[in-house]
Every structure is written in C-alpha cells, then in structure tokens.
Amino acid sequence: MKKIIGVLGIGGEFIRYILLAYDVNEKRVSRVHKIVKEYLVWQQNSTFEGKITQSNLKQLIGRLKRVIDERKDSVVIYYFNSSAVFNKEVDGKVKWIVSNNLL
C-alpha cells in the first residue's frame, strides 16, 4: 500500500513540502529554472524549496520531463511531511525565506 505523505490544504488536496535540485545542460538551465520558479521558491543556483499541492507537483514533474534530457540531466526531489520536520542551516547570506503560512 502506498503511503500518502502530506497534509490536507484548501479544497482537501494534499500539500507536500519539497526540496528540488537539478543538474541540467546549460542549454536547458533557463527553461528549467523558469518552470520550477512558477511552483517553488528559489534558494540558490539550481535549488528550490516550498510547499506544493499534489496536482501542482504532478504538473511540475510533467513539464520538467518535457524539457530535460533524461539521458544527460537530473532532477532530484526530496519530500518532507512539512517544513517543520527538518532543520535548515545556512552559512552566509540567506537569499529567500520560505513562508510557513500554508501548514
């Protein structure tokens, strides 16, 4: 049985907290960055994080699969139950702070 991880949000849809990192060919970097930025908060270089609904996550993954070359590029997604289940430590300047107002 597949375990559903997340919490119910507005409209009863599950919301997940994710960390997404990508390593793609420079020809596709700006397109991938632009797509991911529509769903998550940019942290640094090719790393994004934030809360996302199941349907938006599915949409994001579908859009990325159409852009990347799966033989050469990689996209890694880490899933968390919420932003409260992990600690983040930053050395240096914090570029963006992700809002915690959804969970």
Image (cartoon, grey):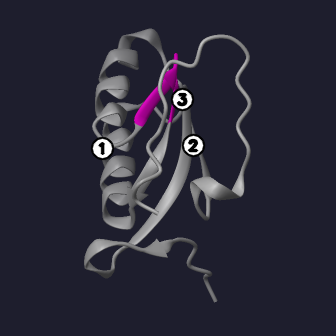
Disc 1 marks a residue whose amino acid type is Arg
Q: What range is drawn magenta here?
A: 41-48
Q: Label 3's element? A: strand
Judged by depth in the image, the label closer to the viewer, 1 or 2, is 2
Q: How dense is the environment of label 1, judged by Cα within 10 Å: few (below 14), some, or many (20 and up)?
A: some
Residue hosting label 3:
22
Relative placement, left or right, of 34 versus 4 is left
Q: Label 1's element? A: helix
Residue hosting label 1:
63
Q: CA distance from mark 3 to mark 2?
A: 10 Å
**Could you tell me which residue is drawn at 30 percent across and 54 percent down?**
59
**Could you tell me which residue is drawn at 41 percent across and 31 percent down?**
68
Judged by depth in the image, the label closer to the viewer, 3 or 2, is 2
Q: Nearer the viewer, residue 57 or 73?
A: 57
Q: Position of residue 72 (x, y in %)?
A: 55, 25
Q: CA distance from mark 1 to mark 2?
A: 17 Å
**Could you tell me which residue is drawn at 40 percent across and 59 percent down?**
102
Residue hosting label 2:
19
